Amino acid sequence: MNHARLSALFLLLGWLLATSLNSFAKPAALKLAENGRALQPIVISDKASGAMRTNALELAEYLGRITGAKFEVTTGDGARGIVLGTLAEFPNPSLAQPLEIRNTFDGKEAFAIRTEKNRVLLVGATDLGASHAAMRLLEHLGCRWFFPAKEWEVVPTTKTLSVSFEETDRPKILARRIWYGYGAFNDKGHPQGGSVLKDYEAWTRHNRMASSFRVSAGHAWQTIILANKKVVDEHPEYRALVKGERKGEQLCVSNPEVQRLATEWALAYLTKNPDREMVSMECSDGLGQCECDNCKKLGSVSDRVFSLANHVARAVREKFPGKLVGCLAYAEHSEPPSFALEPNVYVQLTAGFTQGRYTFDELVDLWPKQAKAMGFYEYFSVWLWDFDRLPGGNGGNLTHIRSRIDRYVKAGAASFDAESGNNWGVHGRGYYIANKLLWNPDANVDALLADFYEKAFGPGAAAMKRYYERVAVDNKPLLSRGLVGEAFRDVGEAARLAKDRPDVLARLDQLKHYLRYVHLRWQLDHEKDKAKQKELTVAALTLGYRTRYEYMNHWAAMRYTFAGDAAKKFDEPTWKPTDRSTKPWLVDAPVTRDETEQWFRAGLEYFQPTPVKELKFSSDLVPVTFTNAKPIVSLQSYQRPMNYALHSRAGEPIEAEFTTGVIAWYRDRAAARWWLRDGASNVVASGTLPQDGEAHKLVMKVPRAGTYFFEGNDSAAGWKFKVEPDRAVTLLNERGHRVISLGQMQEMFFYVPKGTRELQYFWNGGPHKLLGPDKKLIAEVNQDDEVVTIPVPIGKDGQVWSLSPRAHSQLWFFNAPNCLAASPAALLLPKELVRRDQLNSTTHQ
């Protein structure tokens, strides 16, 4: 064969290979509609369930809204059309392995989408998987359901629609739930004639938030007692022995008859509910575990609770193979038991309410070694913690959400439960992203956020990205009136840019209503006059009620707790949720555009931006000896972690005193921890201390002279930190961190750099005084949650000032080092500032 023919043959083979690879990489395209006319029917099996038929109708509805065409739903063999069903209904050997159900549950939500010459195949291992396939196709075509209110639905429009798409997927976490504490309110005011529950279920369905199995690990012992009330009343010894009495809602688990009752109850539950995968054997909420000798012999509270779970699990496995027995790892039984768990005991570790020797992070590591199957319970939002106020709770903290989900997946999580609120105004972005990560922890969050901003806000995307990032919890916002004012202006800018987009304006109007709540709540939280507090309370409740179906605020929680607390505070018994009298906030008139704009203008006027020029200082801290500065003992007491800088002059050990368990009630929490790190964040010393209420002397050896950084973590049991007068020790402010000071702090000293004309800082902590280097009053400040600006008197810059003794919650200096000390003699300052201001051992006060 000559060279020319050989070259031609290689070219032909190359073309054939490229064509083959190209056809493999790109599925066939199928035209679904053309010029507003449907070209393909939606085909289901003649054996399809009612749920499948409903899914098919919904798919037809959305395809119709996209194209303007009417899509028919019919039955058939699946050879042509938009084929929706299960693998059993439309067998396909090539999909048998991708859609395989493994280990009982994994795969129940698996789905496959295939585009072929004559059909689009939307197939699931189960009905649920097929539903996911339909919703994923719509998402691929551009549909979005960001929040549950109808206004947050995005449906693109095009008269001609083709699809070329192939995907096989299943969730990483098998049971995923973001749910509402206080439940869903129910009345007849829904604008589309629906309900809160229907809107929530639609959001979960469209976004594929579902469960391959249902976790049942809620408190159950009280239900067992109630179901056997007559027997338990006749046998008080079945109840826990507490302080010499058989009482309460806990069980005496060492009693064989109690074990029998619990087992019979569990088996009866699974017999009556054959579709349930799990029965709970979790103890009743609260304290009061049995103190009898036989229960004590079983061991710790964890040993007692999980011994009963094991006993029941063995009986369940025998009668109902594959079924599980659920328990929480929570409160007094947070720790793993001392024995192995039965393989069908399912454990759900609860964040935030753990007790015992271990931190939550340590429990995340320990429990997977003990439990064959487990999940995690998080708190995204609790009304009594965040009250729907900016910046919100963990539901708005994307850094927390990403890190926790990643950690749980690595620990083998099969489920994730997040107690949340129907408060999409403050947490909606976080809920949406969290759900995406629960399906696929490796999802590109930046891409998801960009899609959210662009599709939800169109021309206003950049302004709304700035808004969300400005108030995001993980960006540690200093929530002053000025910052809220900037957030208002972000939304205003987005509205101006999107003035020709009614869909975007409808979403922005709802966020404006949420900001109206922020405005009213801000005024209420800062108002001293009781009559005005009452007026603002009614205004906030009225707003919550009138906008309840926008889901910006958690109305179910507001009407119970906010209204209930107001009834007591203002002596208005008819305001109680249980009272059927007409409430002053039950105003059914919808909010008008004029009202929306009037409220928004009032917010713009009230929340004025505060210009701040923030200076950056290094963490390279050095001691400065000020003359005439009297050293004193540094002694502060806190709840929650705090950070200090301490200095070793010649490499000598750093000494301090750490008192643990200051709050006696919390001494059953995990041990107190401490770490000493060098300037490169390397741990040079660390330790754990019992929560015993005692003072523990720390002698921390260091490798060399220099400044080191101390972190104390009390596990919320309270702690004191004491350093003797001859030591340089500085409390380090942390931006956005709320200090919980147990009692009044000492007078705290800080340095005002040379050349400072105005001192600026954010303050939350009530009235306080600023004292100059001569201890004379410079300013008496009554502002709170504000950026405070204090003119610096001539000659008072380059000096040490002080804050009068008090306990602040938040303090952040914008143009001074965030270093506080109980004496100027103990103050550590950034090295570059010390050099610039020519501070040294002879610096004069």
Image (tube, grey):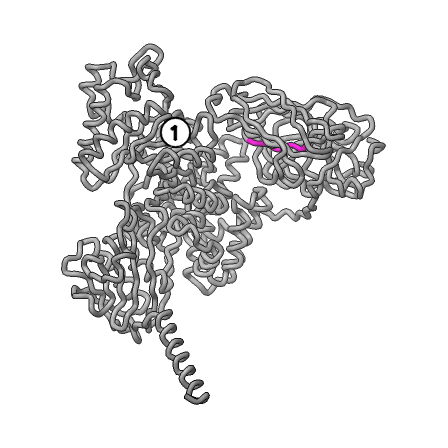
**Displayed quadrant of residue 416:** top left
**Residue at x-position 32% and y-position 41%:** 184
Relative placement, left or right, of 208 versus 535 is left
**In the figure, 476 relative to 157: above or below?**
above
Relative to residue 30, is residue 610 depicted above or below?
A: above
> 174 or 388, which is in the foreground?
174
84, 334: nearer the viewer: 334
- In the image, what residue occupies the spot 23% across and 19% down? 256
Location of residue 822 in the rendering, given as x and y in whole percent from the top left corner? 70, 27
Residue 815 position within the rendered picture, expressed as x and y whole percent measured from the top left: 70, 43
Residue that numbered label 1 is attached to? 336
Magenta segment boundaries in residue numbering: 641-645
Q: In the rendering, at what x and y percent does residue 170 appear?
A: 33, 53
Instruction: Indicate whether residue 643 is drawn in magenta.
Output: yes
Evaluate whether residue 193 shows in this view. Answer: yes
Taking 78 as reference, is 405 left or right? right
Main SS category, magenta section: strand
Q: Residues within 10 Å of mark 1 (few under 14, many from 20)?
A: many
Q: Kindly give the residue lying farthest to the front in the view shown.
A: 1
Name the amino acid type tagged 1.
Pro
